[in-house]
Image (spheres, grey):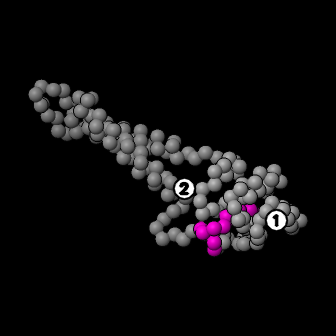
Amino acid sequence: MARSFLVATFADADTLLRAVPPLREACFRIHDVFSPFPVHGLDEAMQVRRTRLPLVTLVVGLSGLALAIALQGYTNLVDWPMNVGGKPTNSALAFVPICFELTVLLGGLGTVAAFFLRARLYPGKQPPLPIARVTHDRLALVLRRPDDEPEARRAWRLLEELGALAVEERRPS
């Protein structure tokens, strides 16, 4: 059986923001919130966990650093050792610019790739919008509909009491 959702539309951000804590206290699962603009304080109200993308950036950046050191060490010591003016072939100062550049480049590219993979974004993907006007002037709160019918009716009533303009049931497309 496909899970269905209750989609409540709100006219303004303040009403939406005030509706989130009572819904969480009533143990209803908020699936997502759609808004045409950022709503400050919504992440805290929904208790959204912090992202792990900085950890991905660190790991991929350190991998870039290790790759740069290994590439330059191999090139200068094994593959093409050159004696330029009696300087040592493994001069650490000469390695700094390349190490910095590869760390930043791979860290940035790895972060973007991890974000796209995690968000399931790919070229040509159409966003699943719960209502038509959510990108213009409406805000939508999407609740997972409880399986129990009395609980679903209670969620419906609670959404209406919290100031929802309309509540409707939708199935994922």
Residue reaching furthest right? 150
Indicate which disc residue 160 carries: 1
Which residue is label 2 attached to? 118
Specify whether residue 143 is painted magenta.
Answer: yes
Q: Secondary structure at mark 1?
A: helix
Q: Position of residue 125 (x, y in %)?
A: 52, 69
Q: Position of residue 167 (x, y in %)?
A: 77, 69
Q: Residue at x 71, y 56 (%)?
A: 14
Q: From the image, which quarter does the N terminus lie in?
A: bottom right
**Drawn side of residue 143 relative to residue 80, left or right:** right
**Drawn side of residue 65 relative to residue 13, left or right:** left
**Quadrant location of residue 97?**
top left
Residue 133 seen in the figure: yes
Neighbourhood count class around disc 1 (C-alpha, 10 Å): few under 14, some 14–19, many 20 upward = some
The span from disc 1 to disc 2 (Cα, nearest Å) is: 33 Å
Q: Which residues are magenta?
A: 132-144
Q: Position of residue 63 (x, y in %)?
A: 40, 41
**Quadrant location of residue 68?**
top left
**Quadrant location of residue 143?**
bottom right
Q: Residue at x 68, y 58 (%)?
A: 13
Mark 1 or mark 2, earlier in chain: 2
Residue 24 seen in the figure: no
Specify whether residue 98 is painted magenta.
Answer: no
Indicate which disc residue 73 carries: none
In the image, residue 113 above or below residue 144: above
Residue type at mark 2? Answer: Arg
Q: Position of residue 51 (x, y in %)?
A: 58, 47
Q: Secondary structure at mark 2?
A: helix
In the image, residue 137 above or below residue 81: below
Q: Are marks 1 and 2 in contact (CB under 8 Å)?
A: no
Neighbourhood count class around disc 2 (C-alpha, 10 Å): few under 14, some 14–19, many 20 upward = few
Q: From the image, which quarter does the C terminus lie in?
A: bottom right
